[in-house]
Image: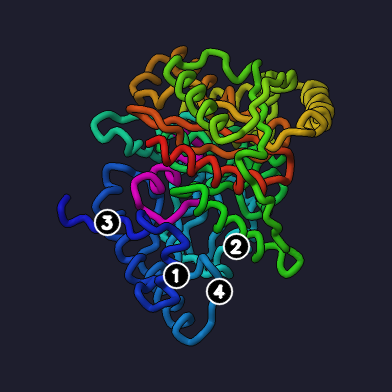
Amino acid sequence: MNDLPLDPFSEHGLEGFARDFRAGKVTSEEVTKIYLQRIEKLDAKLEAYESVAVESALATARAMDLLIKSGTDLGPLMGVPVAIKDVFLISQMPRPRIGSNMELPDILGSGEATFIKALRQAGCVFLGQTKAVELCLGITGHSAPRGTPWNPTDMENHRAPGGSSSGSGVAMAAGLCAFAIGSDSGGSVRVPAAFNGVFGLKTTAGLWPTDGAFPLDPRVDSIGLLTRTAKDALLAFKTISSVLFGCGYQPRRSGARLDRLCLGVPQNHFGDNLNPKISEAFQVANERLKAQGCLLEDIVVPEAPERAGYFPVSMPSSLLSVLGKENFLAQKHLMDPVIAKRVESGLDVKAYTFLALEDRRTKSRAAVEERFIGYDAWVSPTTTAFAPLISDFEDAEKGMQLALGMTQNTQPANHLGLCSISLPLPVDGLPIGYQLMGAPNTDLKLLEIAVEIEKVFAAQR
């Protein structure tokens, strides 16, 4: 595809575009047209997008160009083309399908999601809606009803893109947007980030508003970013937060320095069933951080394994509370069979079982906040294995084992109320991720730490 235009943000990122846009060296319409061309050329195979908003994207881009010329500056994300996971209610776009062919209950109302409004106010250009795993209940990215996006790190073999923000991860990795929005309830941003070789942020649950987004489990649902770099994510996070929280939001730099960081390295749970190559790459990365003056200390997180008992109860139960038993049973035949089976398991859940698990989670969250004292972050591999082939899921038992391995290291952060990040980890062959976990509501500090670690990893390549 010699006629394929280059990703306009690949070299200088969000900061470079913001600088050139204000200097009149580039327009929003120009970069939007390039992304639309790339989508047209590549997405027939990649299937990252559920829908593409060609006309409205171009109209918005032209409006941003006129505004900046008139002296109206909406901030660093003004004129930036973005992709949005198909779970949000967006004005003048199709209602979200959430990866399903079912007729879903009208629980989102008619008003645009608050978070989407914030993106509009920041001047973002909406390229379209990216595919999600059905009902967001799937970490592999495989989803039968509306198709499984193609992981672009291997164009010869169809590999798992990671889910449930599968389309956003693929769109970001393939250069089909400047950055993408996802949601994360158990790893749904970080796993696609790891498998597609990009950066992923899971914000602290409750930090960014989730109204107008289809709920998987409201107790753990969070909005996240998929970006090219930690630096891009930091800029996007600060900009979006300033719009959401107004003049009361005054982000203060943490002054993160590698030679002053203390990172905890869990010795339980996160290393179980780890691919030897991933284990080796993780150890090499840690040694490089130590060489920069980082203090890495072994820790134990006894609460981490609790996630295995919590999510198989909470997520199916939550979905059934939205779908309704009769509605679910009447449309079960339209669903991905694996996801339908998982939802159906919620029919057997007893209320006292769920309440006991939630009570245990509340106590564990408090204990972990205490456990974080003295540590800037905890670190682990993002996933235990590389992105498997889609054909590997034809064996149901093997597919379930693979899925469990994908959530082993990501679900604890959701269960325990943490913010978390996946950085691309230098390794030969398929990409993997290096996970950072931070105490609740330390998202900004965690991003600043990630920017410094990213510099070390970039020097390793």
Mark 2 surroundings within 10 Å by alpha-carbon count, few (fewer than 14), some (14 through 19), many (20 or more): some
Mark 3 to mark 1: distance in Å? 19 Å
Give the amino acid type for the residue marked by disc 3 in the picture.
Answer: Leu
Among numbered discs 3 and 1, the one appearing first in the sequence: 3
The image quadrant that residue 36 belongs to is: bottom left
Q: Residue furthest left?
A: 2
Q: Is residue 416 above or below residue 97?
A: above
Query: Does residue 385 show up?
Result: yes
Mark 3 to mark 2: distance in Å? 26 Å
The residue lying at 45 percent from left, 76 percent from top is 22
Scheme of image coloration: rainbow
Among numbered discs 1 and 4, the one appearing first in the sequence: 1
In front: 337, or 34?
A: 34
Give the amino acid type for the residue marked by disc 1 in the picture.
Answer: Arg
Element class at badge 3: loop
Can you give x and y, in whole percent of width and height, for residue 369 in the image?
79, 34
Q: Which residues are magenta?
A: 162-180
Q: Nearer the viewer, mark 1 or mark 2?
A: 1
Among numbered discs 3 and 4, the one appearing first in the sequence: 3
Among numbered discs 1 and 2, the one appearing first in the sequence: 1
Give the amino acid type for the residue marked by disc 2 in the picture.
Answer: Thr
In front: 394, or 181?
A: 181
Left or right: 326, with 31 as reference point: right
Can you give x and y, in whole percent of width and height, for residue 17 in the image?
42, 65
Mark 3 to mark 4: distance in Å? 26 Å
Q: Which residue is identified by label 4?
A: 74
The residue lying at 69 percent from left, 29 percent from top is 314
Element class at badge 1: helix
Q: Which residue is identified by label 3?
A: 6
Marks counted in the figure total 4
